[in-house]
Image (cartoon, coloured by chain):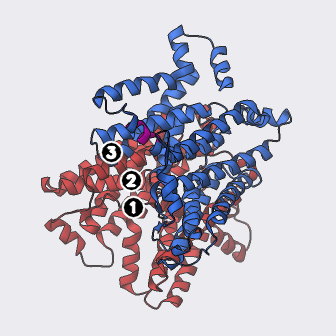
Chain colours: A red, B blue
Amino acid sequence: MSVASIGTGGGAPARLRSLLARNDVFVILVCLGVVASLLSPDFLSAGNLSNLLTQSALLGILSIGQFMVIVTGGFDLSVAAVMALSSVVLARHASIGLAPMALVSLAVGAGCGLFNGLVIAEGRVQPLIATLAMMGIARGLAFSLSEKSILVHDPLLTWLRDMDGFLSAPTLVWIVATAIAFVWLRTTRQAIHLYAIGGSEQTARLAGVAIDRVKIGVYTVSGMLSGLAGVVLVIRSSSGVPLGGLGWELDSIASIVIGGASLFGGEGRLIPAMAGVVIYQMIANVMNLVGLDPFYQNIVRAAVIILAVGASILRQPSGVRRNILGRP
Amino acid sequence: MSVDIQKSEARDGGAWPLRLIRGNAGVAVFVAFIVIATIVSGGRFIQPANISVILFQGSVIGVLALGQTLVMLLAGIDLSIVTVAILAAIVMGAGGSERQQMMDMSGILPFLGFLPSIVVALVGSAAIGFVNGLAIVKLRIPAFIATLAMSLALSGLAMLATGGSPVHYPDPFYDGFGHAKTLGLPLTVYVYLALAILLAVFLARSSIGMMIYAIGGNARTAALSGIPVGRITIFVYALSGLLGGVAGFLFLARTGSVAPTSGGSLLLNTIASVVIGGVSLYGGKGSVANAVVGTLLLAGLGNLMNILLISPYLQDAVSGLIIVAAIMVNVRLDRG
């Protein structure tokens, strides 16, 4: 795909075709939007679109970190549990003051991520198992802090929630976080190292990339973004939710894969990945609008995940399909 | 088991205490844990009634851990094994009782009859494992992804079959079986122990068992020396699926009800049990004894935390920490 777009030859139709192929995620997004507006006239209303973005924001923020981790060829199964933990920590001590506690929540998330990174890079534990363990740790801690959701009363929260305008506070946070990550991915050397490690860890090591440092960094950032998602969860629902985001770790992986990133690492662009998040939420949104039975919604979700993952595997040349569990 | 011992003796280096621990780390930790737990709980831990409770609670995860051990010996993983168990329990629960049909369910599962529903559930479980194996061997999909996708599909199916509500099994058999005791131990424990012994003998004595270790050690070498790597891999995943089905049976017998969401922390605890026991995630190293020791350790730890009135939620956190610690210790010992 990228080769075709670099070449300057070919007429306008060929260029258009390569443009479409490079941006197939956005084509899918638009097509789905057309289908959705035909299925339900409410879909294109400003209220519903604003709502769709707000619904996507939490998963979107988690998925930024997940995206970076997947680019390095890893996985972070702990994102949703860390988000829940962060939201509970914030809500439980909200009386101290929202701003300082938000920083504490970010630090809790970053700490969980740092732990993941150390266990993976220094302890040589596979990302899948290490972050599965962290999922248990964070979810367990969240529940032992509070078995039920904690409601927070705070004028700042009320103000943030009732903010007028098309873009809600969660959406704004998501957009800002995406913009920062986008610039970082485009301009820094560390970002190139992410792709290098995901492409071939051995080659990256031989080329002098400090693999362990990059890995610890990327899992820490993913944890911090999960912490941020926890703060946004409190903004959106005015409560800390220990059960928040159950199963979202898989949703975020699926969204990113829908957005064209490779499950095998080394490949992917952030903005299409975020479009993948919107597509994923859009499917849920439309199923709600047309009033589909929640049980069939689950089936459709499972089918979408399987299709996305299946397509990602089939896109790989067979030689590249290596064992994801890898060897140390 | 014998393979393991030979290996650890062949490796030299380090003083004899270190060598001894390397070979028998699981047993050493196990004994130490029992002593500590007994002291901390003021002797309550070691009471026969409590030991019976630990075994009873450990039997479901124990059977799941046996299946997981098999695939891990091949350097694989089966993330669908818990959902297989849940779906099998749903089929047995809803398909095995006429009264279930009157309950508020989606009505997709037909009434099969008691024994046929068990047969259908077990054959279905093995078939699911077979499909996992096919996907991994023929389509070259990584085990993690293939079984994760399978797990998602199965939880969708479980939702569809039950409409999301739990299946309460009204048949007296399960109640009777689940709580019947022989020589002071529940019958489910005997099923678990019998399966463990069968599998241990199979792995240590049969030629297929030897081949499984060979493939896990180095798949390419195994293929070059004429071992049918693909066929054995598919067989192992089918066996893992079957064990998942058996675990579903024991789950239903123990609790009398099952919901599509019952899986919860079972997967985490299953992997924790296997890894704590010392089965290597990289294949070729480990035994049924490892899995049994790991299961009992984790079940014992959960029981101890219950006795000490520690929040059940913290137990998941502890399982997570233990997984990480156990793997890191195993990696160090492997290198040493």
Taking depth in this image into account, of B186 and A75 the one nearest to the observer is B186
User: Start and end of the magenta stretch?
Assistant: B50-55
Taking depth in this image into account, of B102 and B315 the one nearest to the observer is B102
What secondary structure is the stretch in magenta mostly built from?
A: helix
Decide which of tag 2 and tag 1 comes sooner along the chain. 2
Report the number of numbered marks: 3
Query: Residue farthest to the top?
Result: B15
Q: What amino acid does circle 3 point to?
A: Leu
Task: Indicate whether residue B51 is drawn in magenta.
Answer: yes
Q: Quadrant of the N terminus of chain B?
A: top right
| Tag 1 subunit | A
Left or right placement of residue B301 versus residue B43 in this view:
right
Label 1 secondary element: loop
| Tag 3 subunit | B
Q: What amino acid does circle 1 point to?
A: Gly
Label 3 secondary element: helix
Query: Residue farthest to the right?
Result: B226
Residue designated by label 3: B314
Q: What amino acid does circle 2 point to?
A: Ala
What label does residue A81 carry, if any? 2
Taking depth in this image into account, of B303 and A5 the one nearest to the observer is B303
Relative to A117, is A314 above or below? below
The residue at 57%/62% (across/down) is B87
The residue at 42%/53% (across/down) is A79
Give the CA separation, mark 3 to mark 1: 19 Å
Give the CA separation, mark 3 to mark 2: 14 Å
Residue B15: percent from the left, percent from the top?
Answer: 53, 8
